[in-house]
Image: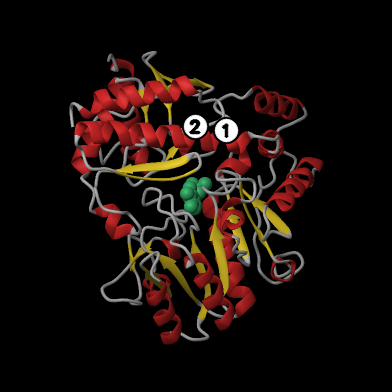
Amino acid sequence: MNTANSQELFQRAKELIPGGVNSPARSWGSVGGNPLFISRAAGSRIWDADGNEFIDYVCSWGPMILGHAHPDVVAAVTRAAEKGTSYGAPTESEVRLAELVIDSVPSIEVVRFVNSGTEATMSALRLARAFTGRSKIVKFDGGYHGHGDALLVKAGSGLASTGIPTSAGIHPGLAQDTIVLPYNDSEALEKAFAAHAGEIAAVIVEPIAGNMGVVLPEPGYLGALRQVTAQDGALLIFDEVISGFRVGLDGAQGIYGVTPDLTCLGKIVGGGLPVGAYGGRRDIMQTVAPLGPMYQAGTLSGNPLAMAAGVATLERLREPGVYDELERLGALLQAGLRRVFNDAEVPVTINRVGSLLTAFFTGSPVKDMADASAGDHDAFGRWFHGLLANGIYIAPSDYEAWFISTAHTESDIQATIDGAAEALKSV
Ligand SMILES: *Cc1c(COP(=O)(O)O)cnc(C)c1O
């Protein structure tokens, strides 16, 4: 594969941008090699700067559920742009997107749009602290909620210990107020609430984890989160930035029948433009300015292009059969990948919900970060490069999800399974 243009661009980029990228995972640090610079995309396909074509399972890390350059979305954004790209004043399109979100997501009675998933989670935590008057928060090992200071924290030694920053430059006081627990462990949760009764403002969780690879909640686990938080008076925040509109219109909360107090959205809700959102119970949301004392704002929040892309995307997703088809393609891919791993005698665990899946290079079940870490990451790296050579583009880490779009076809899936088998030969 000729990647001369990507290599040249990466050299230039490294002189100008830290590490040559505007978001670290794009540098392929964990699999090695020169990241591909993308020049265009359409449907299920992307093309790099050298004209190589790939079936894309990154889908911009989740947002592109309709595939790239969907005609409805392109038309909506174009029409909006012709009327001006930003006013800093309210518009009908944000009312329309709010209606679609509130109609879809069970927990959301009132919603505020922001510019990224990071902003959504930061704002939701500030709101939880404002509403409860408490300072501690609970997150889970392997849960990613964007790059807000209080959330870039990993578990210290021992259960229910205070967190250790995973980034330099984080005020120690912020990490101290973040308690990090293992995911899918109800006992650890109960212990933490016993140790910090009345001090915890909120538990924030990806109800279907997507950032340690895809990890499903064990039966009853989300219900336990709901019960323990309600008993203590802490808020339950579902970070559905990945799962929202991905696993169904009503998200993980719809699938598992557990209603959080607040929900964070991002990725799909912006249809490929920069949007995040947080919303929930009306009484809690009334704490947000200008109604209440919790300040949160944004020059470009509710941007008309972004709202137009979100509306066009959600309207398409509401048509009948969309999620059934994504489920069908996801099941085909999972079954096919299992088959080729078995044939190659390479141990694998494939976790999947609908069009969201991860193949872990381990024969053991993966139900938390420790299990995900136990996979053979070097083997994954070799497979990743083999997939590329076979025209398949997935995220450059086995702590990430594959995303299938409505533009993927059964023949894309079959080509992917065949390519996966070829790529396993070099693992
Ligand atoms: C991507 C992601 C975020 C952060 O969203 P950005 O738009 O990248 O800031 C937050 N939470 C989860 C679960 C995510 O996957």
Q: Residue, x 55% and y 76% (percent of image)?
A: 227
Check contact, mark 1 vs mark 2: CB within 8 A. yes
Q: Residue, x 77% and y 67% (percent of image)?
A: 291
In the displayed structure, 306 sits above or below 375; it is: above
Q: Residue, x 70% and y 33% (percent of image)?
A: 85
Write down the residue under mark 2: 329
Q: Provide the secondary structure element on which disc 1 rests.
A: helix
The figure's colour scheme reads secondary structure
Picture quadrant of residue 53:
top left
Q: Residues within 10 Å of mark 1 (few under 14, many from 20)?
A: some
Q: Quadrant of the N terminus?
A: top left
x, y percent for residue 384: 28, 32
Does residue 39 appear in the picture of this structure? no
Write down the residue under mark 1: 325
Nearest the eye: 105 or 24: 105
Nearest the eye: 28 or 303: 28
**Cα gap from disc 1 to disc 2, whole angstroms:** 6 Å
Q: Residue, x 30% and y 36% (percent of image)?
A: 28
Q: Is mark 2 within 8 Å of ligand 1?
A: no
Give the amino acid type for the residue marked by disc 1 in the picture.
Glu
Q: Residues within 10 Å of mark 2 (few under 14, many from 20)?
A: many
Give the amino acid type for the residue marked by disc 2 in the picture.
Leu
Q: Residue furthest right?
A: 92
Nearest the eye: 414 or 290: 414
